[in-house]
Image (cartoon, rainbow, N blue to C red):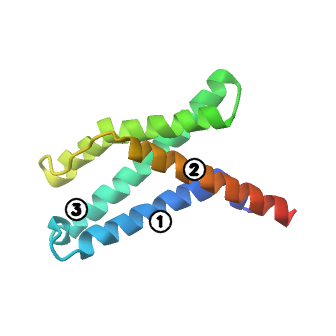
Amino acid sequence: MRQILKSYWFWFYVTVAIISTIDFVDHVTRTDSYFSDIWLNWLLFTIASTISLCLTIYFTNIMTRNLFKRDNLIFQSISIILGLLTHVYLSGPIFDRLIFGQVTLDFFPTSTIFIAGLGIFYVVRLLTYIMTKNLN
């Protein structure tokens, strides 16, 4: 258990889950939100999207590590980018149509999404490194 708590991947996934929770709450608590009336659908979409995003990043990271016999920041960054692309082009639209019964959401790959995703990973990785260095 202690080893898991030292893992930057663990804290990255926790951070993604927290951000998804904040996004869910934000969407259902706005007074003029379409999603406040269908909050259960939005909750299901949020959970499904978050899990699929994290699993895509996880398995892509394992595949690149096994394929190239290396585990470094570049391959981890590629895994995050591929996870985000998969969400924007594949899993997001699929869950949108399955859960809402129609196309409700717009999925566009913007540079902000990739900068935010990579930025969160780099910050979490740096903070985890600092904390584990200071605790040892």
Q: Are marks 2 and 1 in contact (CB under 8 Å)?
A: no
Which structural element holds mark 3? Answer: helix
Quarter of the figure that contains the C terminus: bottom right
Q: Quick check: 76 above or below 126?
A: above
Query: What residue is rendered at 33% in x and 66% in y?
Result: 24
Does residue 96 appear to the left or right of 26 in the view shown?
left
Query: What residue is rendered at 24% in x and 42% in y?
Result: 93
Query: What residue is rendered at 44% in x and 43% in y?
Result: 114
Determine which of the numbered discs, if any, sits on residue 18 in the image: 1
Determine which of the numbered discs, if any, sits on residue 44 in the image: none
Determine which of the numbered discs, if any, sits on residue 121 in the image: 2
Within 10 Å of disc 2 (Cα), the crowding (few <14, some 14-19, many 20+) is: many
Percent x, y of residue 26: 31, 70
Q: Nearer the viewer, mark 3 or mark 1?
A: 1
Residues under labels 2 and 3: Cα distance?
Answer: 28 Å
- Residue 107 in which image quadrant: top left
Q: Amino acid at mark 2?
A: Phe
Residue under label 3, please give it.
Answer: 41
Q: Amino acid at mark 3?
A: Asn
Does residue 70 appear to the left or right of 90 in the view shown?
right
Identify the residue at the far right of this view. Answer: 136
Within 10 Å of disc 1 (Cα), the crowding (few <14, some 14-19, many 20+) is: few
Percent x, y of residue 38: 17, 67
Q: Are marks 3 and 1 in contact (CB under 8 Å)?
A: no
The reply to whether residue 54 is in sight is no
Quarter of the figure that contains the N terminus: bottom right
